[in-house]
């Protein structure tokens, strides 16, 4: 695995950091072309997807409750205090659960 890490330009501690914190928060700054799936000024959960990120895309859990790829330029990363981030992640999880529950019942 060491040669793979070197080939990708990642050091072991960088990989450990990426695995330790796979979720980050981003704010939508542009929803052109995706008005039903994204709301401007809303915070979204970013999932770790290095391959897509290198190609200019971010994997985000959108208003459908599912993860989709969007152009990087549509979002900006945000940093929050631990307590605020924890609260936001809990709210995102609750919202996603509600959306998925509606879909299972056929309420799309």
Image (spheres, rainbow, N blue to C red):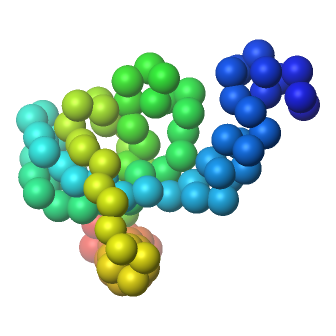
Quarter occupied by the C terminus: bottom left
Residue 62: image location, x then y, percent: 30, 55
Can residue 62 be seen by looking at this rendering?
no
Along the viewing direction, whichever of 76 and 58 lies nearer the viewer: 76
Quarter occupied by the N terminus: top right
Residue at 79% over, 27% down: 5
Along the viewing direction, whichever of 79 and 101 lies nearer the viewer: 79
**Number of marks in picture:** 0
Q: Picture quarter containing residue 7?
A: top right
Residue at 24% over, 42% down: 75
Q: In this rendering, is residue 71 above or below 99?
A: above
Along the viewing direction, whichever of 47 and 63 lies nearer the viewer: 47
Residue at 39% over, 38% down: 58
Residue 53: image location, x then y, percent: 46, 30
Q: Residue furthest top?
A: 7
Residue 2: image location, x then y, percent: 89, 28
Q: In this rendering, is residue 81 above or below 4?
A: below
Q: Is residue 98 left or right of residue 75?
A: right
């Amino acid at each position: 695995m060491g040669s793979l890490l070197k080939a990708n330009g990642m050091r072991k501690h960088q990989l450990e950091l990426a695995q330790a914190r796979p979720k980050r928060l981003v704010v939508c700054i542009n929803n052109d072309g995706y008005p039903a799936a994204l709301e401007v000024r809303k915070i979204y959960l970013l999932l770790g997807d290095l391959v897509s990120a290198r190609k200019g895309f971010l994997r985000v859990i959108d208003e459908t409750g599912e993860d989709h790829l969007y152009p990087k330029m549509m979002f900006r990363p945000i940093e929050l205090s631990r307590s605020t981030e924890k609260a936001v992640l809990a709210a995102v999880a609750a919202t996603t659960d509600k959306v998925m529950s509606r879909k299972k019942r056929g309420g799309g």
